[in-house]
Image (tube, helix red, strand yellow):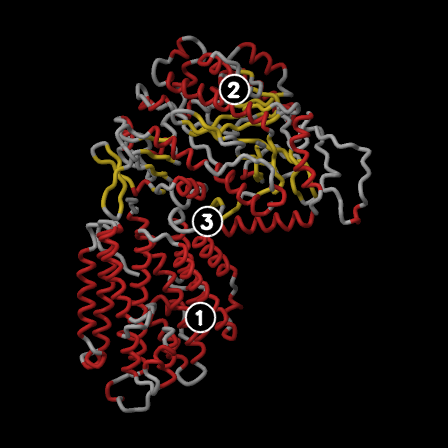
Amino acid sequence: MPVLLARYADTSFWMARYMERVENLARILDVTESFTGDDSGASNWASIVQLNADGKNFFDRHDVADGRTVVDFYVLDRDNPTSIVSTIRMARENARTLRPLISTEMWMQINMFHGWLETLKPSDLALPKLSRLCALVKEGCQTHTGIVEGTFYRDQGWYFYRIGKLIERADQTTRLVDIKYHTLLPSADQVGTPVDESGWNAVLRSAAGYHAYRRVHPRGMQPAKVAGFLLFDDGFARSASVCVRELNGLLTRLKSRYALRGGNHALERLDEIEAMMGDQSIEAAIGSGLHEFLDFLQRQLIRLTNDLGTDFFGYTDATSDG
Amino acid sequence: MAHRPKDLALPPRDSGSTDLLADYRSDGFYDEIFGNDDEHTRATAEVRQRLAVLELTDLRRRAGDAEREFHNLGITFLILSDNEAIDRILPFDVLPRIITASEWRDLNAGAIQRVTALNLFLHDVYHDQAVFKDGIVPAELVTGNENFAEQMIGLDLPFGTYVHILGIDLVRDRDGVFRVLEDNCRCPSGVSYVVENRHMMQRAFPDLMADINVRRVSNYGAKLLEAMCEIAPAGTGDPEVVLLSPGTYNSAYFEHVFLAREMGVPLVEGRDLLVDDDRVYMRTTGGLSRVDAIYRRIGDDFLDPLAFRPDSLLGVPGLMAAYAKGNVALVNAVGTGVADDKAVYAYMPRIIKYYLDEEPIIPNVPTNICREKDGLAYTLDHLDELVVKPVGEAGGYGITIGPRASRKELEACRATLLADPANYISQPMVPLSVCPTLTDEGIAPRHVDLRPFAITGESTWVLPGGLTRVALRKGALIVNSSQGGGSKDTWVLG
């Protein structure tokens, strides 16, 4: 049975994470731009910095977080490792390493996508053009996803790719809910005050979930229901529940198909996460502290990555995070 | 020399149907399309006719498309500049170089002869050293060479093959005679361009290629894998072959990817491998996995910090010990650099005669060995006509090009020659052949060379054709990519 280099498993995992991360970031920038015509503009832009835990890095460079500075920082700033251009550059470096493994079409698309981003100038980021730019970035990521689906040979490399993508997606969704829930609902004593519908609308759109949510909840826009949908819905592709369930299945199949000894810790951890999410209702989670719940979930995802690193990627000690 | 009937009436320029090659003249050099005899002229007639009806604008458009596609496909080499890695494509000229069936018959036989002699020579050098004792090659030229590997003495290799992959640099003189300019016995590169250039031609010029019987080059990877399996240590039923690369920042990384993919084997770096109990393993998701044969694209010096350069981070500690035990095969073998040195090159005709009792099928460029009395005397008498080269690894350093040197430079050359004649060889300047090439001023002659690739496991197979490099600057004789060289597809007609 063909073996897979530990380094390739690591690289495939991270290539997927970077591509997923960029798609999410582009969507959030786009939605923020569309929904900040009104009142809470500045806090929305600032929450993107918070979402990516980039506070220090960002405020070292900018005094205020507004549309211009946040977009500059997250799209073309090569010195910011979390910008779209930096992340795609890393994804492309990974793809370059993986060229013996991935399809020519996968490589070519990432290579051209990266080449296009490199040609962008600051003037292309002007807010009126931002939405179109974000649409093109999302499209680039989704084209990648489609090419992967149709051409990536499904051996070990593909499994690690899928696992990376799903961990990143679960991470992005839990962060989004965590940050937005508190931005939009500052404190418990505000319960009963009119809900900021457009804000929640934007959160759903940031996760490409608005219409899906509407099918499940045709009327109203209740914060708890939105959070519950994003975290627990069984049919929503970006919900934390769906990601964790798929992860569990993938890792189980990977281990058995390729007779891999490692991965037991990761599987146990996924079982734990699944059990915890299965037992939990959104109301209970909110009642006992949504932030604490999400924080725990995120820590578990980081530990999961470390488990994989030690067992499969050849890390000598667990030192990896995004 | 290119001959076209001069009395042929050319259609006026603005008629829109100019014969693309009508104004082409090869300036007195041997021309790779027009040739100098009936056989060549007949063999290339069909291609020339098809080329003639192409429009220059169409040709330029297709050339532009091909260039873009090379870029998008990442068929590039890396240049490091200001700490940034820049991807460059090897400029591709869309007009093919054509080798006829009978020309190839000789080149194929000549390449096999050459690699056979080189392997016998290397085996002898690292075993009985009869070639020294019989006074064919001075021992110190080889044993004093920095590429001589003590570790190889007495080591027996499967089939006595040292040079599993040989790249022979050939030039063609004014009379159309192919001559060997240099052997590349270590890690000859460029074969990926041979195959990719062909793919590109098939996409960009299906009309030019249709029904022309061009010998295929796409099976290079399969042939290489076959040879590697032949030389893998005995007892490994289905040997694990890997390609060892210095990594993604190596300028030839694309070629490493290409070869690994074509062979369907893992592309590894030194950090992926380890040696335990004189056996080589790679680190996989399932733990350590045995490795039997390594196509290494890393120089001897960097292969094993325990045996060679201790500061090398690219290699694998203990690899030489595993190799010496016969637990792993290395391609090419260690210590082959003594055979492609300029000093030894000069002796190749005698080496071929000594081991095979044959005359070289592909002659060398005439070379005067200055350590020998006659060679020195001739060189001193014809200094202004000759290229004087120091032997050893100087690579372009200390070369005096007689026809272009000043009187003062010639006198300096004479002095250094007399001080240490053994360190020099001299050769006439070769008027490299030309091939029609798409340039800014239209179709114009540009100088070319040819690097065929020979693969040897138990026996030798030569890739039909090889890499044609072209000096894109007018009049330039240096075909290296660093000096503005590009490449062409090379067609061996069936």
Is residue A272 shown above or below B144?
below
Where's residue B347, x and y in %? Answer: 49, 16
Q: CA distance from mark 3 to mark 2?
A: 38 Å
Is residue A201 shown above or below B446?
below
Name the residue rendered at 41%, 81% in the picture: A41
Q: Which quarter of the figure is the C terminus of chain B placed in? A: top right
Q: Quadrant of residue A297?
A: bottom left
Chain identity of mark 2: B
Secondary element under disc 2, as helix, strand or loop, is strand
Q: Which mark is residue B424?
A: 2
Would residue A64 appear left or right of A176 to someone viewing this image? right
Name the residue rendered at 23%, 53% in the picture: A255
Q: Which mark is residue A71?
A: 1
Is residue A46 shown above or below A308?
below
Residue at the top extreme of this rendering: B134
Same-chain status of marks 1 and 2: no
Residue type highlighted by circle 2 = Tyr
Q: On the image, numbered disc 3 is attached to which residue?
A: B85
